[in-house]
Amino acid sequence: MDLLCEPNSPAAPPRKTPFVCTEDWDGGPFLTYAVRKGMARVVPPRLRQHLGPDASNEPYLEVIHPTPKEEIQPFIQTWLWFGLFAEMLGLNETSPGHRMIEDALATEEIRKLYEVCVSAAEEDGNKYISAKPVLESSQIIAERMKLVPDRRERFTYMRDCLQFASLMTLSIENLDETVRYSICALGEYFSTGLFQAITLSNPKVDVPIVGFSWHQNYMQSGGTMDKQMLQQGWCPSEIEKLRSQFTGLNTMHHIAQLQRPNANQDHSNCTRHLCTAFQMDIETYKPSHLSQGCTCALIGIDERATSLILRSTDTYPIIRFDQIGDGVDDFELVVEPYEPGVPYVALSHVWANGLGNPKANSLPRCQIKHVAQLIASMQTEAETGDAEYRTQYRMWIDTLCCPVELGGKLIALERIASVYLNAAHVLVLDASLTGFDPQDTHPAELMLRVYGASPWMRRLWTLQEGALTKSLYIQFADKAVNAYALLVKLWTAANSDPRYMKIWQDIVGAYNELQGFFSGREGPTTNQSPLITLQRALQFRTVSVASDEPLCISTLMKLDTKYIAAAPDAETRMARVWELIYKSQGGLPSRVIFYADELLSIPGWRWAPRSLLGSAVKDPVLGVDERVLRLVGDEGIPTPLGLKVALPGCRLLPRPLVAGLPLHPWPGAINPTEDQIILQDTTSGKWYRIMDWYRSKKIASWTAEELSAFDREQNHPLCREVDSGKCVLIYDEKSRVDGTVMTCMGQIEEVEEDFKHASITSTELQVGIRVHRTRTVIMSALSDDEIRMMMAFREMAGVVAMDQETSNLQAIGDRDGEDWKSCMAKVKDKMKEVVAEAWKSRPEVRQTVENTIGLDLEEYMWAFIPKVFSHDVITEETPSEQLWFVD
C-alpha cells in the first residue's frame, strides 16, 4: 500500500501489501482473464458482459458461498493488480493475438514487473509488493499512447478496464484489506491520471467520464482505520464527517495518518453526530492566557464607544492598536467606526481555544499583544508596497467588538455580515493548526488539517466567518497563509503527482462548502441550491447556544437578521427562518415532510426541521444524503394550516372482516410486535405492506431489549392510526424504486368553517385535505407469491371470523374470566384447524409460505391470522396532485 500518499510523520507505520500470487500474469486481454482461468463464476452477473462470448453460465454464488481466500486472493491480485498495471503500460493483448507492441517485448516487460515490484523483506523474509515503479510509469504510458491509431478507442477501453476493476474489487468478500486497497490505490492512481490525460488532450478526445468508488468502506465504522483513528484521539463525529465529506482513497488514507495535535481532548462522550469536547459552559467559561502561568491583567475597550457607534450609526466598531511607549506592554486599544477604505482584519477563532469572554469586552494583555503581532506580520506578508505608506490594519474580534448587553449585541449581529464582507482579510486562529510550519509541510497535509480535521471547521459561527470573506488567511506556526494560495499550491502538486489530484478535488469540495454562499470569491465555485449548500455546510457543525443557529443561517442566506433576532425563543426564530427562505426563494421543498428528525412544535410549522445541525438532533436517523435530498425542490408553500403541497397519496380505511364485528375480534390471541401492516387496493387487486421508517432504520443498531422496549412503548402505532379511520399516506414519488416508496403518514384534521387566509384560495380549501403529520412510513408492493399467500390467509381469517366461537367471544365481557379463556382457546383451535386443512388440501398455500417466509412453519402459521388479518385495511387513492396542508 505504499502507493498511497502519507504525511511526513504518519500516525502509524505504513502497511505492506503481501505478494500472494501463485502464478504470473499471462498478458492476455485484461477483461477476459477469468474466462481463461475457468473462474468466471466469481464475476457478478452484471459484469459478465465484459467477459466475451465464452463467459461461463455458472450461477453466481459468491454472496452465499464465497470462494475461499487462499484461492480467490491470489487470482484477484494477479488479475486486478499486475494485470491492470500491465494494461495501463500497453503490455496486454488488445484482442487475441494482437498487441500494441511486439510479443517478445511485452513478455519481457511483464517479467520485469515482478522483478521490480516484488521483493522479500529483511525483517521476516516474506514477499511484498512495492508500487514505486507505478510512480515512474507515466512517461512510458504516454509513449505507448502515441502508438495507438485511435486514442478515443484506447482511452475508452482503459476507462472500461478501470471501471470493471473497481466494481470487481468491491464484489469480492474474501480479501485482506492490504490486498484490496493496494488494488484500489492502483486504480485511483490510474483513473485520476487517465481523466487528466482526457481533459488535457489536444486535439480534444471526447470520452465520457464515469465515477469510481475506490475509497468505499476504507474508513467504515468498526473497520481497521476507524479503530486506529479512535485510538489515536479522533472524535467519532470527525470520522463520520470525513466518511461523508471525502470520496478519495488517498484523501482518506492521508487524513487517517495525520498526527492529532489535540490528542489529549476527551471524546469519550462524543457520538457519530456530536462532538462534546469543544462545547462550552458559558457560565464557567474564562478567557485563557497565551502561556501557562501568565497572570497579566485583562484589557478592555471603551464599551460606551462601541455602543455609541452601533446605536447612532449604520456601521460597526473596529479597533486600532496604538503603541504609546517604548515598552512591549505600552499600547492601547482605540475604538473607531469602520469607514470604507480602512483595512482591517476580522478574526475567526474557536472560543474553546480561549479568545472569548461572555461576561465582558476584554481579553488578557498577552493575547491582545500576540494578536496585534500576528496582524502586523500578516500585513507585511500580504502587502508588498512601501511600509511607510501603508494604512495600519485595524482589528475586529467578536470578544471586543460585540457588546455583552443584549440590545447592543443584537445590533452587532444584524451587521455581522458586513463585518466579514468588508474585511480586507479574515484570519483563522485555531490552536490545532498553529503548530505546523507551512514551509516544511506539504500543502495536502495543511489543507486536510484545515478543511478536514480542525475544530474551526466544526463550529457554527466560524462557518459564516469563512463563507463571507473575500480573502481567507490561516495562521500556522510562523506565518499566516492565504487559503486560495494553498489551494493553488496543492493543484500544482497534483499536476506533477496524480495521487494528490483526488485530494485536491476533495478539498475543492470543502472549499466550496465555505465559498458556495456568495459569488465573487477566489477559486472554484458551485452552482448547487443555496439550501443544499446550507445543509451540507451545517451538518457536522456545533453551537453552544441553540438560538444562535437561526442568526447564523440568516447571515448566510441574506435574510432579515433583525426580524429573526427579535423572536423570543429558538423555535420561533427558526420558524421565521423558514418563512423568510420561502419569501426569498419563492417556495420550499415538499420532500421535507418525508424526511424528518426533530420538528418545530409551533402550529402551522410542525413539518419544519427544528435544526439543520446534525449535532442538534438527540436521536438522529437521517444520514447526510437524506438530509440533503429532503431540501431539493421548491414546490411547498407555508400556510397557517401547514405546508401546502400537491402530491399523490391515499386514505387507509379499516374494515371489519364481517359486518358487526369489531376491528380486533380476537384481542389477546397472540402478543404480536408490529413489524408491518398489510393493505389491499380492491380496485387494482394490488397488495402492499407498510412499515415504520424510524423502526426500520434503528433496528440494525438496537439490542433485542431496546427493540422490545420500543415496541411496548409505541404499542402498535401504525394500527392505532389506521383504526382511527382518518389515516392517510402521502407519496414521495421521487423515492419510488422497484415498487417501494417513502410516505408521510398523517391524520386528517378539520378546518374551521370561518377560516380564511391569503395563502389559501376558497377552491383550495374545498379540495385540500388538512393533515397532522405523525411519522414516515415505507410502503412496498407485495410480490405475486406474497399476494397469493395473503389472499389465502385472508380467506381463512374470514372463515374464523364467521365461526360461532368468534361471535361467542364478543359476548363475554370479562377477559380475565374462565369463560373468556375457554372461548379463546376454542377460537385458536379453529384457527389451527383451518390452516391445517388448507395446508393439507391446497399445496399452493404451503408452497407460497415456503417461498416467502421459510420451511417447516406449518404448526406456527395459525398465528398469521390474528397478527395480520384481524381486519382489512383498504387503500383509497387520491388524485395524483391532491392538495394537502401538512402540519
Image (spheres, rainbow, N blue to C red):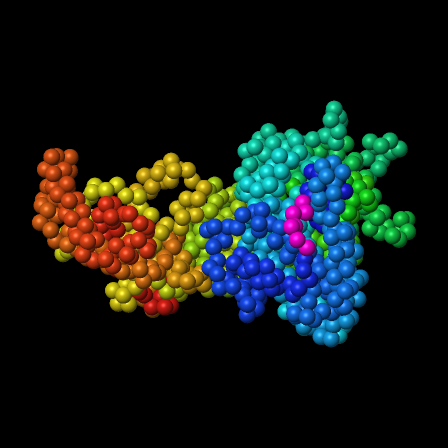
In the foreground, 54 or 224: 54
In the visual, does 151 lie left or right of 816?
A: right
In the foreground, 656 or 11: 11
Residue at position x 65%, y 50% in the image: 21
In the visual, does 372 lie left or right of 737?
A: right
Q: Quadrant of the C terminus?
A: bottom left
Residue at position x 33%, y 59% in the image: 782
Can I make out residue 544 in this image?
A: no
In the visual, does 138 lie left or right of 229?
A: right
Can I make out residue 615 in this image?
A: yes
Quarter of the rendering containing residue 406: top right
333 up-or-down from 412: above or below = above
Residue 211 in the image: state x and y as whole percent. Answer: 61, 61
Residue 734 in the image: state x and y as whole percent. Answer: 45, 63
Q: Is residue 21 magenta?
A: yes
343 up-or-down from 364: above or below = below
- Looking at the rendering, the stretch of residues picked out in magenta corresponds to 18-24
Quarter of the rendering containing residue 461: top right
Residue 691 in the image: state x and y as whole percent. Answer: 36, 52
Residue at position x 34%, y 41% in the image: 711
